[in-house]
Image (cartoon, rainbow, N blue to C red):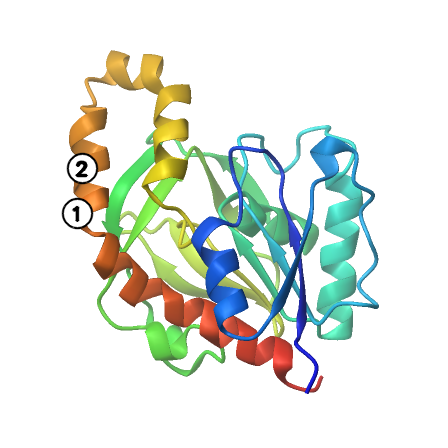
Amino acid sequence: MARPKVLVIEHDLTCPPALFGSWLEDAGCSVFVCRPYADDPLPTLEAYDALLVLGGPMAATDPHPWLAPLRDLVRTAAASGVPTLGICLGHQICAVALGGVVEPNPRGQQLGLLDVGWLPAATDDPLLGPLSTPRRAVQWNDDLVTRLPEDAVALAVTPHGETQAARFAPSVWGVQWHPEVDREVLEVWARDDAERHLARGIDQQRLLDEIGAAETELETAWRPLADAFAALARSPR
């Protein structure tokens, strides 16, 4: 059987597929990374079995030339049943593409290891259902999905009610957290955020050490998400 082909949209050199890309390959997928910020043309979906939209430092509605066509691509994926997963910015792009609203978090940047607040609707979800048990995830984001698209289903929220995960359409999901990151990726983000973290009194070293100490826990928690997404990519539509 041919390996499922997963199209990965990378928005910035500092936000690679990292662990998630490796896990997808381990699960039997072929991973194809498109880097539109480096002038890669945004492909169509005909040759691919799934779409993964990564995070990035921009906002979902910023005027980068590839974001509007990418939102069109997400709508095409939703209409044709192509399994699609958005991570952080990708989650927000999927929401906006399908009619939702994304805004800066009035509480400020979400940062660090946070509990996933699963909702009852997650239990039977085709992608996240088997994962809807207590687990932590890395969040590192400024913006939030503040209004879900019509017919979307919230799957997890923070204690403040902020969306952490949603099924935006029958084949389109988003997670606000970062299942893909490792210590190397986070150290780059920490350097980029060093000045504002210093102003907020955030101890970056302690934060990175805490996440680093949870490396095994996080792989155990989120490698199954890659496995489940690979299974959807492998399934006939």
Q: Amino acid at mark 2?
A: Asp
Quadrant location of the C terminus in the rendered image: bottom right
Quarter of the rendering containing residue 220: bottom left
Mark 1 secondary-structure assignment:
helix
Q: Nearer the viewer, residue 220 or 159?
A: 220
Q: Which mark is residue 213?
A: 1
Residue 216: x and y in percent read: 23, 59
Q: Which mark is residue 174?
A: none
Quadrant location of the N terminus in the rendered image: bottom right
Q: Residue at x 21, y 23 (%)?
A: 202
Residue that mark 2 sits on: 209
Mark 2 secondary-structure assignment:
helix
Q: Nearer the viewer, residue 165 or 226?
A: 226
Q: Amino acid at mark 1?
A: Ala
Quarter of the rendering containing residue 141: top left
Q: Residue at x 51, y 33 (%)?
A: 14
Asked if residue 183 lies left or right of residue 64, the reply is left
Q: Nearer the viewer, residue 42 or 101?
A: 42
